Image: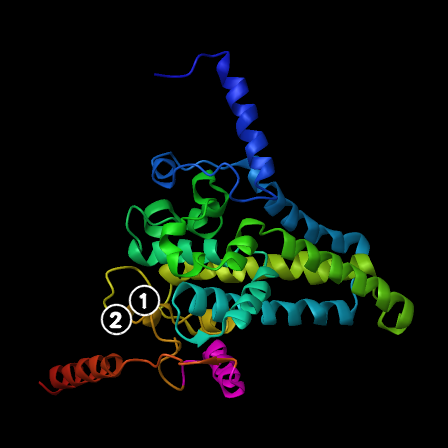
């Protein structure tokens, strides 16, 4: 039965207040996850306002200007944070493709926090749900189901996709420090933003030859770099399920793309990943560039991480069988 007309403004106001509080405490008044999934896809404009501001902040270039140093910092921050998304949020927290210590696990979560892509537990829970329902009706960001634009950016503005389904990350939720970072997921990005601004102000005083400033560094190092990082990451949700080549029949639309692998440091080998998601390497062959894997391999030499799960032999056996089958058909 629909709510009385007089009650609707009160309900909308209450919803807006809760969305506002969620900027600072993402677990505040968490609704039942299963009940939320029954609701239609709808943009929560209040909750999404910081995301909109992030994009609008890129326009600051019009008055903050640019400098070679600021642009270089933006590019550097893009790549070290893309590595955090792909190597830590994805290959560690989502799939546990390698092992590490509890203190270093916390460092990985902090590093991932500066990417401004929510907390590690939310990211992992959302991604695990994607693998369970890839390109099915339940998939949160499937181009097949909801269209390209929704899979790329729309889904993250939807109110029912904001809460963390802790049931999917029980292995991670037992660490209170990870839950804290996940619940208050604006703390690290805010500190990062202030740090970038402060660095710019400092350099303006001690290294005027760099021709940068606090606002210029904030615009390039935070707003532009972070926006590019978001869209680079989102290409895997959208483009890698539309364009590219399929090596394996995975039952979904995942594809491999060399171009996307360069943009995302190795995530473009998405069809490989959907076939064997538990291995740390996504470029299965030497010509499939996977920079994230190379960096994780280097980290393992330091002893900070270990037990990197290899590509299973069956992945190559399957390819040999397909190659033999094609050769047999050609010879006849």
Indicate which disc residue 217 carries. none
Residue located at (49% from left, 68% from top): 88
Q: Tell me the residue at 81%/59% (across/down).
A: 214
Instruction: Identify which residue is drawn at 47% across, 41% down.
Output: 158
32 on left or right of 157: left
Quarter of the image for the N terminus: give it: top left
The image quadrant where one finds the C terminus is bottom left
SS for tag 1?
helix
Q: Give the side of residue 5 with respect to residue 245, left or right.
A: right
* Front label number (1 vs 2): 1
**Label 1 crowd bin: few (<14), some (14–19), many (20+), radius 10 Å:** many
Residue corresponding to mark 2: 248
Provide residue 224's location: percent of width, then percent of height: 66, 58
Front residue (pair 80, 124): 124
Q: Name the residue under label 1.
A: 274
Q: Is residue 248 above or below residue 323?
A: above
Q: Could you say which quadrant of the image residue 74 lies in?
A: bottom right
Residue 23 screen position, x and y as percent? 60, 43
Q: What element carries label 2?
A: loop
Q: Is residue 125 magenta?
A: no
* The image quarter in which residue 161 lies: top left
Q: Give the range drawn in magenta.
A: 287-303
Q: Which of marks 1 and 2 is nearer the N terminus?
A: 2
């Amino acid at each position: 039965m629909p709510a009385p007309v007089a009650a609707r403004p009160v309900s909308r106001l209450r919803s807006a207040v809760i969305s506002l509080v969620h900027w600072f405490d993402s677990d505040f008044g968490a609704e039942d996850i299963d009940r939320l999934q029954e609701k239609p896809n709808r943009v929560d404009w209040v909750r999404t306002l910081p995301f909109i501001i992030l994009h609008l902040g890129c326009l600051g270039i019009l008055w903050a200007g640019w400098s070679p140093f600021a642009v270089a910092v933006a590019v550097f921050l893009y790549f070290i944070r893309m590595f955090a998304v792909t190597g830590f949020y994805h290959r560690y927290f989502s799939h546990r493709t390698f092992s590490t210590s509890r203190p270093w696990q916390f460092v990985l979560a902090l590093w991932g926090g500066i990417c401004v892509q929510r907390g590690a537990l939310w990211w992992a829970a959302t991604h695990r749900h994607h693998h369970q329902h890839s390109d099915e009706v339940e998939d949160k960001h499937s181009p097949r189901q909801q269209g390209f634009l929704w899979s790329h950016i729309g889904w993250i503005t939807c109110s029912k996709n904001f809460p963390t389904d802790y049931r999917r990350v029980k292995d991670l939720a037992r660490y209170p420090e990870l839950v804290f970072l996940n619940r208050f997921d604006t703390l690290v990005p805010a500190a990062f933003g202030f740090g970038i601004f402060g660095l710019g102000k400092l350099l303006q005083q001690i290294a005027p030859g760099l021709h940068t400033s606090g606002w210029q560094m904030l615009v390039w190092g935070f707003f532009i770099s972070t926006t590019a990082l978001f869209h680079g990451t989102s290409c895997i949700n959208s483009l890698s399920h539309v364009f590219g080549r399929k090596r394996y029949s995975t039952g979904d639309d995942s594809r491999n793309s060399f171009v996307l692998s360069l943009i995302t440091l190795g995530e473009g080998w998405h069809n490989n990943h959907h076939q064997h998601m538990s291995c740390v390497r996504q470029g299965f062959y030497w010509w499939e560039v996977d920079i994230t894997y190379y960096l994780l391999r280097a980290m393992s030499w330091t002893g900070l991480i270990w037990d990197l799960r290899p590509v299973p032999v069956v992945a190559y056996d399957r390819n040999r069988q397909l190659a033999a089958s094609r050769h047999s058909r050609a010879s006849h």
